[in-house]
Amino acid sequence: MNIKNLAAVIPVVGIAWLLNLPRHLGMVIITEQYLALMIGLATLIGLVVQPSSADKKPKMNLMVFNGLFGLLCLLSWLWLAVNYEAWLLDSINRSVFKWLPAIIAIAGILEATRRHCGKVLTILAAIFITYGIYGYLAPGIFSAVETTPARYILYLYNDTNGILGLVLRVGAIQIVGFIIFGAVLNAVGGSRILTDLAMATMGHRRGGPAKVAILASSLFGTLSGSTVANVMSTGVVTIPLMKRSGFPSRYAAAIEAVASNGGQIAPPVMGATAFIIAEFLQVPYSTVVFAALLPAAAYYFMLYLQVDRYAAVNGLEGVDKSQLPKLGDSFKKSWPLIIPLGVLIYFLFGLGYAPGKAALYASIASYAFFLVTAPRNVSRLGVLKEIAQTSGTMLIPVLLVSAIAGIVIGTINSTGLGFTLTLALGQIAEVGGILPLLIVTAVIAVILGVGMPTSGVYVVVSVLLAPALVKAGIGQMSAHLFIFYFGLLSMLTPPVAIASYAAASLAQSDMWQTGLTGVQLAIVAYLIPFVFAFNPALLLDGTWAEIVLSCITVMISGYILAEILAWKKAYGGGIKRAVMAAFALFVGASSALFEAASIATIIISIIGVIVIVITQKYKANGSNITPKLQPEQKTSS
């Protein structure tokens, strides 16, 4: 048996749970028992199946050790599952038969996480565990509540506020369905269909290959739970295409990195984090989707404008239509994508099914359509095997990250660290106001988010920082999306811009230059969270007048900033360009500085429109305010 086939066990168990198979078989299994089985399987398989990035095959003695250790970890979780109901009635007894399996289980999670998610998340978890045991020795306000090691370890092991808590519940129930859905779409050609549609729609336009990258990466990225995975999936096609059309290597890489990262904030899936946000805030999933809609639209609007202006300045044309797929043909071939998406929307919003189950039904519809339409020489069973292996491999890091998040949350709850951080950040708000608090929170979120997958970024950062923002008067949805945005920006922010560096490796460009270019292209993501923190109308929380005016101010600001960032001589260059940049920022922030539907915001919006009209007129006449665009050298930076 191929050892990689073990990964297929995880989605099979997940499907059985989503379809309520235990209940249909007359078995009484509570959710925590299922979660224990899933994290046990993820640990075992994570230890014996090497991640795709592993360069060397481990030696036989190491493989044997991995197998034995992984099996021991699985047995530790199964021991908990079997005894879970009895232990609920006997929580005071902390015998060696409880805490020894707990130590083995947690150690296995840490090692499997190190291999599949990197050292950063593992070290962070180890720091929290150390703090949970020895935090009472810390000085000042950071001194934790003292607890015995056995009590603390068992709290992480079997309490619903620890590893078997909210995040693992979302990962093993809701996210499982969408991981399977993404694997099915990819196996039946969904990513190719998305690329063809993007090519047919955008490929012939000015700077077309870059616009193809934006569209394809945004659509694929929302289903993917990893920015880097998105970069590596779509970047192998889009980056060479952009380079051939004349984009510099560092610019092509930065476009792909920014577009891929944007997929994590784009509804409806948001890299699977939308479900976790909904669970944390105890709101319907649809509420999170609609709240995230306008900021995500602004993100891609700004990215598109910058790419368009850069292409105009540098004379970068699109691909000849004769070399592109026909739009009509692309739509005709898109049924394997349209049908399952329609099923997903129907079950999710029409019938109100749980997200995981709705995604599973969409997966079944997609594969059923494939069975009917695929050529005879294509192995149906082979594709099904590929789906199971792919989804299982993708679920390993998701479940491990969820378990690590449970360790973080459990430590915060048991030590009082959350209250301590809320108090410390609250003092910043009392002294300097909300803006300094937001700035400090943003910096901490970027630092904490380094090297972590999307869902892990959100969970760790939101648990630590969101309560302070809410206490300072910021709305819950605004606070959580603010933290989510800046946690994700760690993927683009030097010196550890992992997504930009992954794209740079594909483009063979300078990593530092690529990272800085990525910051420029993603500038709206650094600015708009501050706006919706003060003005929730951008999250569709307000009157229609407030929402419309907020959108107008952001669009005006984005249009002007795109011109400025794409061309050094925009608006005459020098001091004039700097003044226009300041004006653009003022317009964009006006709905937060004043009431969203106030007279001041209306007047500023009108002035912004007038300024754009005037500068466009001068541009058309070749005035020295904004000279006519002249193509620069295509290889310039």
Image: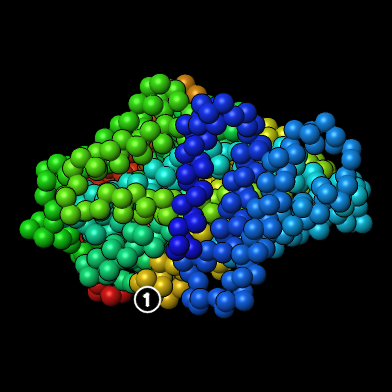
Picture coordinates of residue 470 (x, y %)?
Answer: 68, 35
Q: Is 24 or 243 nearer to us in this picture?
A: 24
Quarter residue 423 falls in: top right
Q: Amino acid type of disc 1?
A: Gln
Q: Residue at x 57, y 26 (%)?
A: 26
Position above or below: 566 against 476: below
Above or below, 106 relative to 590: below
Is 180 displayed left or right of 88 in the figure? left
Closer to us: 84 or 403: 84
Residue in front for this viewpoint, 267 or 58: 58
The percent position of residue 135, horizontal first and vertical second, equals 87, 54
Position of residue 367 in the picture relative to residue 208 (left or right): right
> Dot 1 surroundings within 10 Å: few (below 14), some, or many (20 or more)?
few
Residue under circle 1? 508
Q: Quadrant of residue 357?
A: top left
* Residue visible at 54% across and 54% down in the picture: 396
- The residue drawn where x is 92% and y is 56% is 137
Foreground of the two, 263 or 7: 7
Residue 317 shows in this picture: yes
